[in-house]
Amino acid sequence: MPKAVTVRAFGPPESFALEEFDPGPPGPGEVRVAVKVAGVSFVDVLSTSGNYQHVPKLPHIPGSEGAGVVAATGEGVDGLNVGDPVFFSGGGVFCEANNFAAAKVGRIPDGLSMETAAVMTANYQTAVYALEYRAKAQPGETMLVLGAAGGTGIAAIQIGKNLGLHIIASASSEEKRRAVLAAGADVAIETGAADWRDQIKAANHGKPVDIVFDPVGGDLSELAFRNLGYDGRLLVIGFTAGIPAIPSNLALLKSASIVGVHLGDTMMRWPEKAAAIRARVIELAGQGVIAPAIAERYPLRDFVAAMNSAKSGKAAGRILLTMD
């Protein structure tokens, strides 16, 4: 019988178990997928701790994105057939098989690896929504990416370069700075350096930046906001370092904006927009724009190590669980 990581009480990954799990046949509008690869993110760990803004119902199978092979289709499902390689999003991914809503399952474009497909959904849809829809980024603008070696950071770099932006990537270690440069950043600077703001100015020829892509939060957000120019945009992606407190007078003096980027809510409220964002990511994947950095791979039985690595934030790139 297939197995799944099962959360019966919120807590650390060590308190979860790998249990037998059979999702049964897919219902109407569902697809049963033999999961092959799952992406592991900080949000996956946060949600299982019970401290995330969206608290899942228990028992709960973690994971929000992955890739695999269609094993069966339910009534009313068109365009997907048994044996198709697919990527998908939603809950219940840290398992060997599960049923997913067909609307959240897509066929992997030709030439794209299953590993890439497994981790392109959340990160790259976030980056497309943030830059193309919320920031309305224009060619020639400069973007500072915080937490640049993380999954959303790498996605922002690659989507930003495709839009013609000059990318300054901030990362905390030499390994991470090498990773962001390999992903396409124009300049890599050191997060936490005493002269961090001076590094930003130097990287942009003494000028303020136009966009800040911020999945980090904390004290770094205010410092980054101070490096924004007139009509600049701070994109709030998340706050792994804590919720920032940015003085509102800074926005007034610069005519700058703090722009929220809540992809999940957008996907639920505006299905047509969600479909367009999803189609855009598939289009970019087919063009070779999308190339997530894979830092670590763990077998399903080592899910605790994988989740703790995601929690630490030390990896330069994405973390994967493999089911074989």
Image (cartoon, helix red, strand yellow):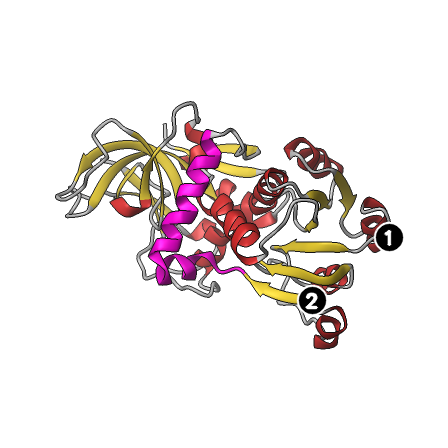
Element on which disc 1 rests: helix
Q: Is residue 86 left or right of residue 321?
A: left
Whichever of labels 1 and 2 marks the residue nearer the N terminus, that label is: 1
Q: Tag 1: residue type?
A: Asp
Given the current orientation, which residue lies at the most extreme front position?
139
- Picture disc at residue 256: 2
**Which is more toward the observer, 198 or 238?**
198
Q: Is residue 303 left or right of residue 230?
A: left
Q: Give the quarter of the image for residue 140.
A: top right
Given the current orientation, which residue lies at the most extreme left position?
75
Q: Is residue 311 left or right of residue 198?
A: left
Q: Give the quarter of the image for residue 214.
A: bottom right
Q: Is residue 63 visible?
A: no
**Which is more toward the observer, 169 or 230?**
230
Residue span colored magenta:
261-286
- Pointer 1 residue: 198
Q: Tag 2: residue type?
A: Ala
Q: Is residue 113 above or below residue 8?
A: above
Is residue 44 found inside the magenta-colored segment of the image?
Answer: no
Mark 1 vs mark 2, foreground winner is 2
Query: Quarter holding the C terminus?
Result: top left
Query: Quarter holding the N terminus?
Result: top left
Name the spot of residue 122 as percent of width and height, x first.
46, 47
